[in-house]
Amino acid sequence: MAVLAAQNLRKSYDGQEVIAGVSFGIAPGECFGLLGPNGAGKTTTLRLCLGLTRPDGGSVELMRRPVPGEARPARARVGVVPQMDNLDPDFTVRENLLVYGRYFGLPDRTTRERIPQLLEFAGLAGRADSRIQTLSGGMKRRLTLARALINDPDLIFMDEPTTGLDPQARHLIWERLKQLLAQGKTIVLTTHFMEEAERLCARLAIMDRGRFIAEGSPRELISRHIEPHVAEVHGDGVMEWAEGEAGALASRVEKSGETVFCYTADPGPLLASLSRRPDLRYLHRPADLEDVFLKLTGRELRD
Amino acid sequence: MMHPFFPPAVSLRFVPVWRRNLLVWRKLAIPSILGNLADPMIYVLGLGYGLGSILPQVGGVSYVAFLAAGMVCSSTMNSATFEAMYSAFSRMHVQRTWDAITNAPIELDDVVLAELVWAASKSVLSGLAILVVIWALGLSGSALALWVIPLLPLIGLTFGALGLAMTALARSYDFFMYYFTLVITPMIMVSGVFFPAEQLPAAFQAIAGFLPLIHAVALARPLLFGQVPADILLHIGVMLAYAVAGFYAAAILCRRRLLK
């Protein structure tokens, strides 16, 4: 039984279709990742799921309730970590949680009982009386996560939860998300960090121009869409090498700036060729989700 | 979520949002109350006694009393307008507080209602501050003046609702300057706050009759000086109409802005 099901969602702004027929279902306990370049429609998809915007076509069921019709009771079982921090700057850490609990109709007593655990979980023990301005970016993100858990939700939406964080802060968030999954929570996550998606998500969808263009586990996506080996080659003669020899040695050759990416199932001949070219430098590595992502969504910049 | 043009679906869920604003206010309550008292005191004493010394009685009372009665209404209006515009805009647009709230099981309509009731609540304090000044200076001795107290929330709701509609349209704080300069200030001038509206050409008086402030003044001033106002229902009706229409516009414009 899905905790979230979207059927053929469509949404246009000013005649431009930003969600062009998206369908998916999310099972309890799953971590589902939504990947896509900027402007792909990830945040709009989340807003449609939460009932914060009305689709032009299609339907959403959140916590088995039709949305936006019954969005309010549905959201009572859901937590949201938004992309932009919107903690209350006038409040302390504790007041932020207390006031947020009231939005869910929780009695202050219940919220006060939950606060110490939530702060412990967020690595903010002892900071209950700190003002928001004194927290680092990572601490704010963790407090936003704690705030999203105030109603003990079954499903948590996270919109780019680690954007702008340093590696330590990012790893801590990942650990906490794994703990939540171990507790049986369901997570829907948008990100453009492939590493994050590969670590956390059992299943993911790559989204571009309002559509799901690929769906599966990270491993499936890699084996289905991309050759297993990559050589990233650069150096003075690389373009001429790419035009000539490389074409026969790699099944796919992509140029990006001064670098040539060679994708192949059998790296032996390619590496042998490269070893005879002292003017070229290269990095040989297994293909990863980022290669899939770039293959499917292209290398040009999105703004 | 509501359809773009459905009437606002108001509910008691606005209460926790109102309490949020109260909690913020409580942290700054003392300077805020001092400001509420000091600002009208300066006007009433400065203009009242300064201008009053060169003016004979106005409308049968001293100028300072005349002015103070008008300022009960204009200060309440200003306070509600300011809160519904600058403060609500910073919560809606700058701090994204509304986004955080609507991720919880609270609808945007509830948030807009909470902001309206909050703006009115704060404006009541401003109005009360001037009433206190009036009573402290002995400018009003009538028990009828107590009826001004329930008038204050109506003034607050009226101008809070209009301010919120402006907030829903605003791209930045600069926008509010236009509203103050082009709407609020001229309305104060034609509504009999500083001088009797009858001093103005008939055309201005006719326009003023369609604006809400003059109706607030038409209720507050007689009550403060011990008379039962004329046309009570008309005055209340005009303000209520502005309050309801303003709130409806604010709710729809906020939906268009935030739930698109």
Image: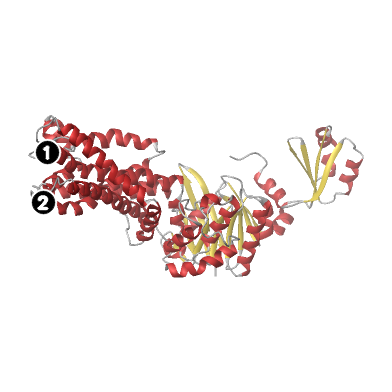
Assign the N terminus of chain B to one quadrant of the image.
Answer: bottom left
Circle 1 crowding by C-alpha within 10 Å: few under 14, some 14–19, many from 20? some
Residue B142 image label: 2
**Disc 2: host chain:** B
Counting from the top left corner in percent of width and height, residue B184 is at: 26, 37
Circle 2 crowding by C-alpha within 10 Å: few under 14, some 14–19, many from 20? few
Q: Is residue B164 visible?
A: no
In the rendered image, which quarter is residue B43 located in? top left
Q: Is residue B36 left or right of residue A109?
A: left
Q: Is residue A302 left or right of residue A7?
A: right
Counting from the top left corner in percent of width and height, residue A177 is at: 62, 62
Type of amino acid at the residue the image marks with label 2: Ser
Q: Which residue is mark 1?
A: B62
Among all residues in the image, which is located at the extreme right? A276
Residue B137 image label: none
**Disc 1: host chain:** B
Counting from the top left corner in percent of width and height, residue B150 is at: 20, 54
Q: Is residue A301 left or right of residue A101?
A: right
Q: Is residue A179 visible?
A: yes
Residue B124 vs A71, above or below: the answer is: above
